Every structure is written in structure tokens, then in C-alpha cells.
Amino acid sequence: MTHPKVENTFPPAHIPVRPDWIEQSNEPILEPALPIVDPHHHLWDRPGQRYFFEDLLADVQSGHNIEATVFIQCRSMYRASGPVEMRPVGEVEYVNGVAAQSASGLYGSTEICAGIVGFADLMLGARVRPVLEAELAVAPDRFRGIRVMTAASPHREIAPGFGKVPECVMMTAAFREGFAELAPLGLSYDMWSFHPQMGEVADLARSFPETSIIVNHAGGPLAIGPYKGRQNEVLKDWSKSMRELATCPNVTMKIGGLGMHIGGLDFHNRPMPPSSKDLAQAWQPFVQGCIDAFGPARCMFESNFCVDKGTASYVNLWNAFKRLTQDFSADDKAHLFSETAKRVYCLK
């Protein structure tokens, strides 16, 4: 989808990040030696919210053993001029510079932005290929794929931070013509859609079995708007969708993003931030549901920082995931916390 007029215009964060509030509940690190690859974070400079290399570094160095991270597109640092379709190349170029800064070794052992997922307008159809090739050219060792915002809903109160998206985009001929350009270049696709759209996601996955699709944020379960107060019904529908998606071998699940406002939780309205026990209890049905459907080898935990930082600290977020898997085998934990991400994003 083309955003020629809004690529540098952003709404406020859904849940504002309040560092003083968040850090009131930082806990001792559980299983501090457990290797983690964080496969989903952003870097940006937006009105009221700045999250750059040094901010991410402070989070990943807060105690957990974060070996590497993967940057996911967020309409950051687009080029200010040139053909509109080529402007997203600036984001990949910028993030590759951040990765090079990290690779100097001056800032610790974590490989920041070891993988990069950018944006390219698939509605260009086959004309998207030069954009993809340009992104590969500016980050040949790190560019892994793209994400297009397809999270759409007919309900006006459900709109992601990037604004309303037309419904059924994934089913259009133009989108699919563009999507067909990914696999020949060895590129993956990060999927951000809400849970009622998972049927479209499954159809896309079956139509392009050679393309690796990584579903973001546990499949986007909704608990706001008309879904508010209908948790049992949503969980039932979502669980059915997860089982259907899991029949597509080219689909992998990212578990996270559960601190976003769409999840309907009210932790950010409380005097004290949530503990990892609070988070684990609230997130358990969706975490376990993903793992039951896909298995640990096709799941990976994600931080979704700094978006989820409005709800929880980096320390407590990863502690919550560790609590939820405390009885898992060492092999299963390895998949969930690092190995799946390394395989899917082709990291060392």
C-alpha cells in the first residue's frame, strides 16, 4: 500500500511509555544464562516518542542474555525525496548503519539488528522488484524480508497506530503479484493482521508455499471495540484460526505484542506496573495456544519494543515468558527463545 502523504506522519503511541512508572517493578532476572534472540523491535523518532540505538541498548543490556535482535519495519527514516516507492529503502539503509555500529563491538556483545525487515509496497505488483533489490543492495548481509501493514477491521474504533487499512488487501491480484516477488529473492514476509483476518493469511500461505511467513503478535487477538468483554468467544475463534494456520508448513508464529492496547488489558492504568507473574497470568491462554498449535520449533518470543514498553519493562516481559515455560524442556526453550528466530531469519 502506498503512503505518499503520511510516511513521516505518526499518531501518538497507543500506550505512552513512562520510564519512571515502568521501572518501579523491575525484578531479578530469571534464568539469566538462557540465550535470547529478540526477533521484533523498532527504532524511530516520533512526536512524543524516541527509541534509538542507545534506548534499545539500555533495554537489551538490562539483565537478560540477549544475543541478537531483528529490526522490524515501522516507517522510520524514509528518504525525503525521490520516487515514492523507493523511499522506504532509507529505513533499511539507516538500520544497517545501526547494525554496523553494533558490530563494531564497542557497545557490548549483543548483535543489534542482525536481521532487518523493511517495507516495500506490494500493491505495485511486479514493479515492486526494483525496490526489493535496492533494499538488498543497501543491506546485503542483513536484509531478510518485508512487512506490509495489513491489520484491518470494519470497526472504526479498531485502528493500529499507522491508521486505517483497507480490508481484504491480501486477497487482491496486485498484492499477490507483488508477494510473488519475495521467494525468488529469498525474502520472507512478516504478517501483521488481526485475528479475524487469519483465514486470509492461511489462504495466502497456501497460495505461496515457498514463501516464509512469520505471523506477528500471536495473530493479533482483539479485545477492544465489539470484542470487549467477549474473551471466551475471541479465544475460541482465535484458537481455531491458529490450528488452521499451523497446517501451513511455511508459517511461523511470533508470540508477543500482547501488551498493546488492542489486547484490552488495563495494566497501564494501575498505580504500579505489572509483575512478570501478572503478565504471565494475563498472557497464558494465547502463549500456550500458539505453542499448542505450532509447537516450540515454529514459535519465537518477541519483545515488540518499544510498543509494549507502555505496559511492561523489558526485564519483566522476558521474565513472564520464562515463567510460562518454566516446565518446558531445554530443547523447547531453546527453540522459543532463540533457535527458531535464528533459523527463520537466517542468523548466525
Image (tube, helix red, strand yellow):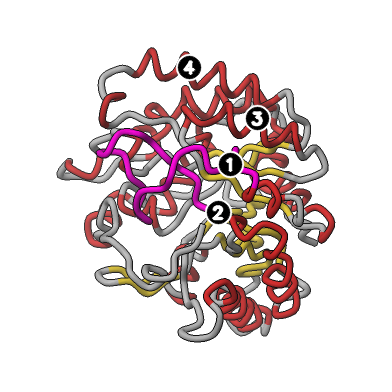
The quadrant of the rendering that contains the C terminus is bottom right
Against 293, residue 200 (above or below) is below
Q: Is residue 134 visible?
A: yes
Mark 1 or mark 4: whose residue is earlier in sequence: 1
The local secondary structure at tag 1 comes to helix
Residue at position x 39%, y 39% in the image: 276
Q: Is most of the magenta stretch helix, strand or loop?
A: loop
- Report how far apart the C-alphas of labels 3 and 1 lie in the structure: 11 Å
Foreground disc of the pair 1, 4 = 1
Residue at position x 39%, y 50% in the image: 308
Which residues make up the magenta segment? 148-173
Can you identify the residue that label 3 sits on? Answer: 202
Can you identify the residue that label 2 sits on? Answer: 148
Q: Do the CB atoms of the residues marked 2 and 3 lie less than 8 Å apart?
A: no
Q: Do the CB atoms of the residues marked 1 and 4 lie less than 8 Å apart?
A: no
**Image spot of residue 129 (x, y percent):** 73, 66
Amino acid on which disc 2 is placed:
Val
**Marker disc for residue 170:** 1
Q: Nearer the viewer, residue 248 or 29?
A: 248
- Report how far apart the C-alphas of labels 2 and 1 lie in the structure: 10 Å
Q: Do the CB atoms of the residues marked 3 and 1 lie less than 8 Å apart?
A: no
Against 247, residue 197 (above or below) is below
**Marker disc for residue 237:** 4
Residue at position x 31%, y 52% in the image: 310
Mark 2 or mark 1: whose residue is earlier in sequence: 2
